[in-house]
Amino acid sequence: MRVLKTILIILLALGAIILLLGLIGPDTYRVERSKVIAAPIEVVYDQVSHLANMRDWGPWQAMDKDQVQSLEGTDGTVGAIWKWEGDTVGIGQQEITALEPHKSVRTKLTFVMPVVGEMVSDGTFDLVAMGDSTEVIWGMEGENGFLGKLMSKFSDRDGMLGPMFETGLANLAVVSEEQVSAMAASDSYGGFEITTIEWPETVYIGKRDKKLKWAEFEAFYGASFGATGAAMGAAQLEMAGAPSGVFFEWNETDQTADVLAGMPVKAGTDLMVPGFETHVIPACKMLKIEYYGPYDQSGKAHEAMNAMIEAKDLTHYGNVVEEYITDPGEVKDSTKWLTNIYYMVK
């Protein structure tokens, strides 16, 4: 009886200690590592903002080469989910929750643990441009529940995850820097062929919005192209090309654009059509990409342009032009929509 009483006291004491440790542990945790990579921020951002790219540099790939992986949603966009399952890496998923182009990526990491159940953490990537290089700060953070606080007393989360982050960043540097070297050796960037052309002087008329919200592009384009076409007919003006968007500014911060939606016309530079704006792009050197796909996924083509401009030490000035060759009303398959993208450079 005395022995049982002693055992009970010991168990109660251990329980009290465990309870105390689970209450006084840290409420939150964060593990982070950073590295400066010799690659432009556009290249590095493309790597960390697309979940499938982690197959090339993620530190966990080598741990379990037989793991089963799958992607749900559109990679590189909020809501995309990368799932994995394997004997070594276990079961889990990573979901993109927020993107700030060329600045940061936020993800939700869910790990399915035996007995414990699901453990959720937030993944963070923050990028800082440093000339031709980029500082990458990779972190994982979250809140400690009772078990998390208790485990923090017996395990070193930073000591376990930190070296993995260091390995991943080293791999990311190799992949990004190899991509830059390949880009510098050719005019193929991000999977796009970029050609240099001599652009002739071109006169546009159309409707211009200097603070057009990204979400309102489709409605603005539809109204502007229709009105411009009608005005051209009334003024007996002849088209000199396809309907186009002429961009003066693209604002990532407030998600707006300064854009003229209209038509190139065969007319003099002094053309005036009441209610419409005339804009002239002079003869100049342009970079051109033939982009096939949905309009809202053309961002990678623009990133490829910026990467080439950076690699070739060119200067972009003036306008960006998107020339919409395919009529979506006639071709329903969006993968066959051709948009010619032009950048003025010198």
Image (tube, grey):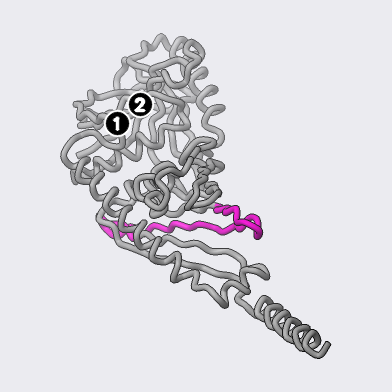
Q: Are marks 1 and 2 in contact (CB under 8 Å)?
A: yes
Q: Nearer the viewer, mark 1 or mark 2?
A: 1
User: Is residue 175 rendered magenta in the image?
Assistant: no
Write the start and end of the magenta stretch as one range.
108-135
Where is residue 226 drawn, in percent x and y? 51, 17
Magenta segment, prevailing SS (helix, strand or loop): strand
Where is residue 123 drawn, in percent x and y? 50, 57
Q: Quadrant of residue 242?
A: top left
Q: Locate the N terminus by quadrant.
A: bottom right
Where does label 2 land, which residue? 291
**Frontmost residue, 18 versus 216:** 18
**Element on which disc 1 rests:** strand
Where does label 1 land, which residue? 192
Q: Quadrant of residue 161?
A: bottom left
**Element on which disc 2 rests:** strand
Between the residue at mark 1 and the residue at mark 2, the CA separation in whole angstroms equals 8 Å
